[in-house]
Structures are given as structure tokens and as C-alpha cells.
Image: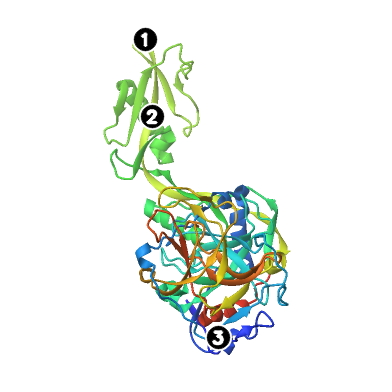
Amino acid sequence: MKRTLTLGGMAAGLLASAVVASPAAHAGNDISHDTLASSNMAAQQVAAFWYGENKANLVNAKPYGVETKVAAKHISKGGPSADSKPGTVPAIGDEKKSSSKSKNVNLPKTTGKVFFIGADHRPHWCSATSVQSKYHNLVATAGHCVYDTESNKATLDKWVFVPGYYQGKTPWGIYVGKTAYTHYDYDVYEDGDRDYAFVTVYNGVLPTSVSGGKKYESASYESYGQALEALKKLQAQKDTGYSSLKVESVVDWAHKVALGTPGSKKVAASVAQIAVDPKTVNSARETLENWAKGHLGESTYDDKTWGAVVKEARPSRRHHSSRLGWNSSDAAKQTVYTFEKDGKRYEATFWGNFDTDYKVTGKVLSIGLKDVGRLGDNVGGQGLAYNQKIGQPVFVFGYPSGSHPDGNHAFSGKTLKWSYGKTFAAKAPAIKAEELQGVKSSFTGEGSLGSSWLLKYNNSRRLGYLNGVTIGVSDTDGNDRYDTSVSPYFDGETYGVYKAAANVWSGKIV
């Protein structure tokens, strides 16, 4: 994973603009960045993956449940302290502060869901929000909603942000992730104090046409393990929109083997298939005929590679008993042989036992896309606050899902929810976190990962300052109900990671 230079002196106070310097202007090695979709073609295929098959991958995605629960005994007093002077970055459109207020809680347009393929190779989602940046192209969420902490790959696959997502609807389009930025300590050590990520995204896209996708079928593999490995490589590809991939067993008609051979299969077979070699079809046909006449009922040939089932052809049955001989003149279709013996008519069907190979099958998706512009231009972007005093009230916005420990399914994850409370200092050594902030919240863990903590939220403008992202939840009073959400404390080093990402251009994919 690459490391970039940043940090050093921090700007303090309210900034007059979103970005004041390039990352190269800072000293230090505290930032890591990793590519999500490196090219326009790769990004198009990622979008196609989520739009394809009537958005089945979006609709069927499950809330991400990795590292959500923090045991109550691991939430303790103590916690963060500012590493420099407090500072803020204004939200998009709020560079000039507005004093208007509203008593009602109007939900922000900036919040949505990030979708990706988890370590289990299935689609999942977390909460996230758009934030201010030079090119209006930045998303903030929990670090482990971007970085694959389960399989230890660099990043989660096919990563996209969908603001305002609801039951398959993408009102402002899909924004494919381009580059992910996080703190070096999280990238390398999975330090819970640095469990946040800022992701640059390409311009949003909406579909203009959607096809079901072309059928995909791989070459044959000798073992299931080889085919499964090939499937995983296809799933990990970022330049092709594969979907509905699975491993299927296929008969290797070129290799007839004895019954009981590991990896073999007994199947109905024609004369040509049992003969295997086209040169031996005629002799094989004669052998099958003679064998059937001498072995009424079910039988297996001496080498156990094939056999026959011979039954009396009764007039009431609709078989091929209307004429004697084979049911076809084509050896590839000769599957039933009818003959007479002792005044009775019989039908013989044949089977062969063949080696099995494995193939990967699925679809290659094809989607027509149109550009809908930059993320921040469409939904706005929250500001950023760092080195703030603990004890200030924040709104938490996200898509909680799943159940409390007592089984109560309080949230569906389908709609955006909010909670409100004052932050407090916390520690959670079990997740390598000594400088956390907590807030009282009934959000359940699944789905709420990445929820935005907004300081000084203005209801009328639906804008505030991002001051945290949910990385876990806890039941601190032992009543089997989650009552606390925790976030890394945003300090000067968080600002450094943010600023490195906030200066990077993404561009269009179509």
C-alpha cells in the first residue's frame, strides 16, 4: 500500500475555503491511499455490476456486520485530547455562515449508503456522507467500510456511494469510488483510533439502458478448488461486471471411468458418448446391443464404466416401442434400443460413468450510462470539524439495521434515521482504541457503521460539520439494548488525511 506525505502544521479556526494547501505541503508519513477503480472502464463495470439484473445486487445487499459490537467492559473513561488548535472546514454552500435556525430535524441530502463486496463475496452496505472538497467528490465513512479487515486484502471490491438510496432507487445516481485515503496506522495496524476513511468518487451515473448480460462460461477445471479460485479472481476483477457467478460440475465426456472413481458421475449416455472415440462407434453399438439382449433388468458392464437398464416395452407406455432398433440414426442421439426376445419386446437405455470437471458460469453485464455530475453539486457536502471539545451535542445520521442483543429488531435499515446527544470521552482497548468519543444512541450496529456525526447541524440548510463516524455500538448498562455509539476522535491527523483526499480530482467515467 502506498504512503503519501502529509501533516505537519495545521490550519486553525474557521477556514475561508474548503482546501488551503496540497498534501505535498505537509511533512510526515501518516497517510495511506489505495485505488478502488483505477480507470474509466473499470468504474463503468463497477456501476454496471450494481445496476445490472434490475439492481438485484443493490436490493439484496445486507448490512455490514463486521466489527460492530464493542463489549461494555471495553468502554471506559479517558479518551482523546486535541493535538493542535481546533479547526473547521465549512460545508459546500455554507462557506458564508448562515444564522437561520429551525426546530424540526430535516434529514441531510448528503447521507447515503456505500455498497461493496465483502470478504464473503456477497454485497453489503454501510452508512456514509458526502463532505466538502476542492472538486466536490469526497465521501466519508468508517475505515472498515472501505478496507477489508476480514480477508486482509487492501480494499473492499466494487465500492460505490449512493446518496438517498431507498429500495433500489438511486435518485442522484451511483458514484464509483476511485481512491481511498486513511491513516497509516489503520491501514497497517487496524488502529481503532484511526478507523475512518475518505474516498474520492467519480462523477455520478444513471442508467440509460440495461441488458440482462451475456452468458459467461469459463474453461473447464479438473477440481472444484481450481474453479472456485477462478471464481474468486473474477469477483475481484475491477474491470469487468460479472454477476451471478457460481461453480458448476460438468461431465467430461472424453474420460469414461469405473464406478466409484472419486470425482466421477453416472449419467444417461448415447452410443457415441459411451464409445468416446468416434472410430469405435460401430463396434460399441454392436457391443451395447448384444449386452442388452443378454442382460434383462439393470446391469453393469465388466469394466464398470457403463451399463444398461432393460425393461419390457408394454403397449400402454408411450416409448419408442413402435419400431425395432435404435431411436435415431445418429450415434450421438442413439439412447434407446428396442428389440424382441422370447416373443416379448424390450427397451434398453444406457448409462456411462464419466469423470467430472468444473466450470464457472454467470453473466457479463452490459449497461448504458449517462453522467449526472459531481457528488457535491448534486447533494452538497458536510463541513469538517477537528480538535473540538468533548461534550458538545451532535446529530448522528445513518441507516441502522439489525437487532438489539435482546432480539428486538428496532431498525430496518431502509430509511435514514437520526439520534442526538453530547459526546463523551471513551476508550476501547479491545479494538486498539485509546482515544474514542462516544454518544448515547439506540442505533443498532449493522448498517449504522459509517454514520455521520454532525456538529452544529443547521436544520434549514441541512448542513453541519462532520466530527465523527460510527465504528461500533455497545450495551453499556447491561440491559441487552445498545445505548452507545463510538467514533474515532477527529484531530489534526484526521484533518491531514481528509485534506490529502480533498485535493484530488476524480473526473467522469462516461
Q: Nearer the viewer, mark 1 or mark 3?
A: 3
- Image coordinates of residue 302 in percent, x first then y, are 26, 33
Q: Nearer the viewer, mark 2 or mark 1?
A: 2
Of the pair 500 and 268, the residue shown nearer to us: 500
On screen, residue 211 above or below 375: above
The C terminus: image quadrant: bottom right
- Image coordinates of residue 72 in percent, x first then y, are 37, 63
User: What is the crowding at mark 3: few (fewer than 14 residues within 10 Å), some, or many (at least 20)?
Assistant: some
Q: Secondary structure at mark 1?
A: loop
Please give the residue where the numbered disc 2 appears in the rendered image.
350
Q: How many marks?
A: 3
- Image coordinates of residue 116 in percent, x first then y, are 53, 60
Please give the residue where the numbered disc 3 appears in the rendered image.
85
Q: Residue furthest front?
A: 103
Residue 275 quadrant:
top left
Distance from label 1 to label 3 (Cα)? 105 Å
On residue 238, the disc is none
Residue type, label 1: Gly
Question: Residue at the spot x=34%, y=24% of the render?
Answer: 292
Please give the residue where the numbered disc 1 appears in the rendered image.
343
Question: Residue at the spot x=29%, y=38% of the render?
Answer: 259
Distance from label 3 to label 2 (Cα)? 84 Å
Compare marks 3 and 2 and give the one earlier in the sequence: 3
Q: Secondary structure at mark 3?
A: loop
On screen, residue 135 above or below 359: below
User: What is the crowding at mark 2: few (fewer than 14 residues within 10 Å), some, or many (at least 20)?
Assistant: many
Inspect this view and state whether residue 37 appears: no
